[in-house]
Image (cartoon, grey):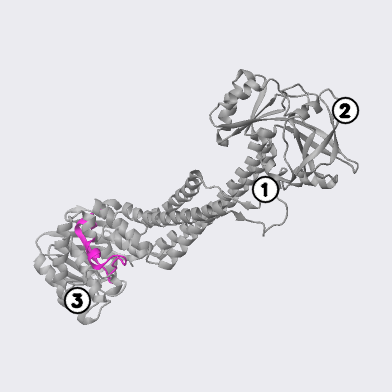
Amino acid sequence: MSERQVVKLTRVTKDYGEGAGIVHALRGIDLELGSGDFAALAGPSGSGKSTLLNIIGGLDRCSSGSIEFEGQAIGSLSGGALSLLRKERIGFIFQAYNLIPVLTAYENAEYVLLLKGVLPAERKARISALFAEVGLEGLEDRFPRELSGGQQQRVAIVRAIAPAPALVLADEPTANVDSATGGALMDLMAKLNREKGVTFLFSTHDPMVMERARRRIRLKDGVIEGDTR
Amino acid sequence: MFESLKALSVVAWRSIWRNRRRTIITLSSIILGVTLVMVLVCLGEGVYVKLVNEAIRLQGGHVTVMHAGYLDAPSADLFILNTGKLRGRIAILPGVERTKGLVMGQGLVKTATGGVGSLVMGVEPDAELAASPLPGKITAGKYLSGNGGAQAVIGSAMAERLKLRVGSKFVVAVNDSRGEMVEELCRVRGIFSLGSDEMDGYLIQVPAGFARRLYGLPGDALTYLGVVLRDGDSRHEVARLISRMPEAAGAAVLPWEKVLPDVASYIRLDRTQNYVFQAILIFLVLFTIFNTILMSVLEREREFGVLLALGTTPARLRAQIFLEALYLNLAGVAGGLLLGGLLVWHYQVHGFDISSMTSAEMSISGFSMDKVLHPRLTAGILGIVGGSVFSATVLLSLYPAWNSAKIKIAEVLR
């Protein structure tokens, strides 16, 4: 399925604290993600899943090693350049949805497109199509507090994929919804991966997510224990 | 670009209303603070303007021409002469309402009951009737008329002390310009009440011609040539123009602050006290806004983390917080100016009666103050109050705005 390399990590480490209290969250991670991957990152709490996602997404910096995003080394990029990279190429789905409470569902989905300067007609076309695809039609004007957890996560998915990113990073996207909703969300993301070629990397504890992923990366104590397809 | 800015302002506007109660409390604090500061400033200015207006109209006008040595050592023999031509030239200067001549000296008012020291003010009754507040404060008898008769208006406190009534006679004793003791019999034509024991017990007004005779001064001698202006703010310019006139050569041409230093000092002191009080009020208002913005930033760190994660630039995030502060600020200051303006306008028209708060006589440097205060609202006050609160708030909001984008995204999203 993989066609071209999206992310490449080479001997990436991440340490928190210093001296005797130092915590080695990641210990020499080597990982490649290709275009079209639908990968799950599993492991017990504290294994380094979220840290790895944050580093890949440019939300945090590694202590050593190198990270390439679409062939570009991002370890030394400035905050502004990382901001630009995230806006242009990376989508995020958070465990707690993290929609902007003062924006409607439509405005939340539109937010990144606005930042990117996508024209109004194009924005409307993209979001309307995606809302229809994920079953959010008619809910465009509702604020996050007026939506269920599953609906909010769908809006978050639309927000993540509407700008057509190269990679979507999802941090335990099904953790706050019931299993039926979680299954539906996974089906939705699998469909978007299949039909639109969006690359997904999930962190998860959920066996259901692991089952549906086409690639399973197991992390333990900051080290990749297994990587199966 | 426009769409993006519009979205930014929408997020900022909606964000300030997400905690409606806090926003209303903050807005109320700003509105109340600005209103209070405005009312206090305008009341103060109203009092100063009235005080100055009454004092200068009673005495030497906005600008006074006098003998160069008089202010340092006032004496009846320090006078100016040949003022007719000078008065003519001054009268046609722009902004001049009128000129008035005064002959001033110390004296003793004596009756069978006793005697009191007094300020003898020789006046031109017609000019005083047009320019001075005193003729309007006559409570018994009439104001002076003519220019030379041995008549006087005296204060109510002096009348009471010396048991004088309208029509009574008294002796006024002075040292004339040659140092000789002179006494003249004089009749009370009217009794005034300026509301200040100091003035009502000390001042007598007589016609200027009578005063000249009393002090042994030549025909047109004046102690003060007072210039009353339509707008007191032009006094320095008018003083400058007069001092350049050849007819004023050798004379001192002074603005009222130099002639009435006690009044000027009081206003300076009172204004400074007001500024301190107003600064404290403004500080409290600013603290409220700062606290609100800071709290709003601190409790939304996770949201800011999300915005930054989605690709919002730090500059855009800072602009959003800055806009939130700006909206609060604009709404609060505009509301405060509006409410303050309405209150000031109401009291400007109807007066703010403080007689129920104090029964004591209120006077400053012998000039009485009305117990019904009329605030004075000017564009300058609106600009200074609104501008200072607005600018200070804008400056204060820079800190929380700057800090909002300094968060560690991974930490706040954890």
B272 or B19: nearer the eye?
B272
How many marks the image carries: the answer is 3
Residue B16: x and y in percent read 38, 62
Corner quadrant of residue A63: bottom left
Tell me the element at label 1: loop
Does label 2 or label 1 sit earlier along the sequence?
2
- Mark 2 vs mark 1, foreground winner is 2
Indicate the chain on which mark 1 is placed. Answer: B
**A178 versus B236 height, above or below:** below
- Mark 3 vs mark 2, foreground winner is 2
**A40 versus B337 height, above or below:** below
**A11 versus A186 height, above or below:** above
Corner quadrant of residue B124: top right
B244 or B201: nearer the eye?
B201
Residue B77: x and y in percent read 78, 24
Q: Which residue is mark 2?
A: B181
Residue at image location 24% in from the left, 54% down from the top: B3
Indicate the chain on which mark 3 is placed. Answer: A
Name the amino acid type tagged 1. Met
Horizontal side of residue B154 vs B51, given as left or right? right
| Mark 3 → mark 1, Cα distance in angstroms | 84 Å
Tell me the element at label 3: helix
Q: Which residue is mark 3?
A: A209
Indicate the chain on which mark 2 is placed. Answer: B
Name the amino acid type tagged 2. Met
Q: Which residue is mark 1?
A: B369
- Mark 3 vs mark 1, foreground winner is 1
Say few, some or many: other residues with alpha carbon within 10 Å of mark 2 (under 14 / 14 to 19 / 20 or more). few
Residue B100: x and y in percent read 66, 31
Q: What range of the chain is rendered magenta?
A: A84-110
Say few, some or many: other residues with alpha carbon within 10 Å of mark 3 (under 14 / 14 to 19 / 20 or more). many
| Mark 3 → mark 2, Cα distance in angstroms | 117 Å
